[in-house]
Amino acid sequence: MRAWVLLSAVLWHLTGVGWQRSSERTGKGFIYGKPGHPVKIYVKLHHSSPILACMDFKRAKKETVDPTYLWIGPNEKPLTGNNQINITKTGKLMMEDFLEAFSGLYTCTLSYKTVRAETQEETIVKQRYDFMIFAYREPDYSYQMAVRFTTTSCEGRYNDLLFRVLKKILDNLISDLSCHVVEPSYKCHFVKIPKHGLMHELFIAFQVNPFAPGWKGACNDSADCEDITNHNILQARNRIEEFFRSQAYIYYHDFNKTIPAMHFVDHSFQVIRMDSCRPGFGKNEGLHSNCASCCVVCSPGTFSPDVDVTCQSCISVRIYGAKSCT
């Protein structure tokens, strides 16, 4: 039985009939340095970094004689190629399976020669380029929702029964998406409605998140589980919105304008997206304006112990991605 039909049947049983109602990137995909200005780069966790060029865009357009490249990592030691770090003969750097600990300052020094044609005099020129690289994740989405239902009175057991039935119907509607309803609550209020006088209404609020018991099984061992959970919660949001839209339609069309005394108030559905970040990550629009919606790895001096939105200060933290103040 479809969910909106089930709720309709419950409402009729309860009360019967009532009244009527980004970076410096080129076309080749390289990111070039800027002399004297660190370039900020954001790399999604467990993904590959963009290709970083050890020169600026103007230098790349010119002839460069006997170039050499030296990359220094966040640990202030020279970088060498391995299974996660690739440095080409032309000084380009790319990292695979980027982790929190890879975040930090990457410095490249380009050395090359200028040669005077008439004397063959050689001069060595050195230029340093700084890249600040941060790991980030997509935020975990949840939705805060609110709806209203009419009722005959603020007293009695029918209000609580409607509340419990509604929660159960919504949970069943989205259970296959590993989503569920949490923190549900309701209050009964008197509402003055034009042409209808004083009415009783239930103001119902609840949150929907993608972390129902067993939710990790939906990830299929994916490194980017938030992509899957965010996709699921968006589907859950759409299903719930369609459910309440159907409530309004059935009452105002299928019942010949005669509706139950307890029913959904048309246009009362409201939804707000709530973002949270995994431990070790947080949002900071001031520091990371080019990735303001991202959950960026907490920098040294900060930490995030739980699914909060911001990183907290802690002067003893010396690493990226700290989950505790130690």
Image (cartoon, helix red, strand yellow):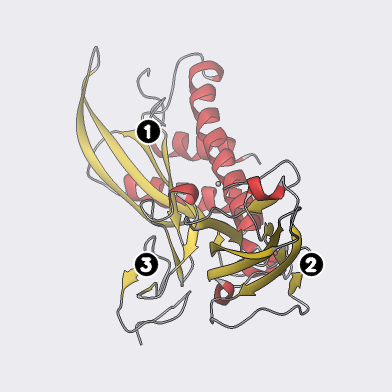
Q: Judge depth for marks 2 and 1 and give the one in front.
A: 2
- Determine the residue positioned at 46% across, 72% down: 280
Q: Which residue is mark 2?
A: 88
How much space separates mark 2 and mark 1, taking CA atoms? 70 Å
Q: Are marks 3 and 1 in contact (CB under 8 Å)?
A: no
Secondary structure at numbered mark 3: loop
Under circle 2, the secondary element is loop
Residue 10 locus on image (x, y percent): 49, 40
Instruction: Label 1, secondary structure: give it.
Output: loop
Would you place residue 84 above or below residue 308 in this image?
A: below
Query: Mark number for residue 311?
Result: 3
Of residue 287 and residue 7, the one placed in the foreground of this image is 287
Q: Which amino acid, mark 3?
A: Cys
With respect to residue 290, does 217 lie above or below?
below
Residue identifier under label 1: 262
Q: How many marks?
A: 3
> Percent from the top left, x then y, of residue 20?
37, 17
Q: Residue at x 73, y 65 (%)?
A: 91
In terms of sequence position, does the residue under pointer 2 or pointer 1 come before the other?
2
Which comes before the other along the chain, label 2 or label 3? 2
Q: Nearer the viewer, mark 3 or mark 1?
A: 3
Q: Is residue 136 left or right of residue 281?
A: right
Image quadrant holding the N terminus, namely top right
Q: Residue furthest right?
A: 89
Tell me which label, 3 or 1, sits earlier in the chain.
1
Q: Are marks 2 and 1 in contact (CB under 8 Å)?
A: no
Frontmost residue, 105 versus 12: 105
Report whether residue 284 is seen. yes
Mark 2: amino acid: Thr
Most distant residue in the bottom direction: 326
Q: Residues within 10 Å of mark 1 (few under 14, many from 20)?
A: many
Amino acid type at image mark 1:
Met
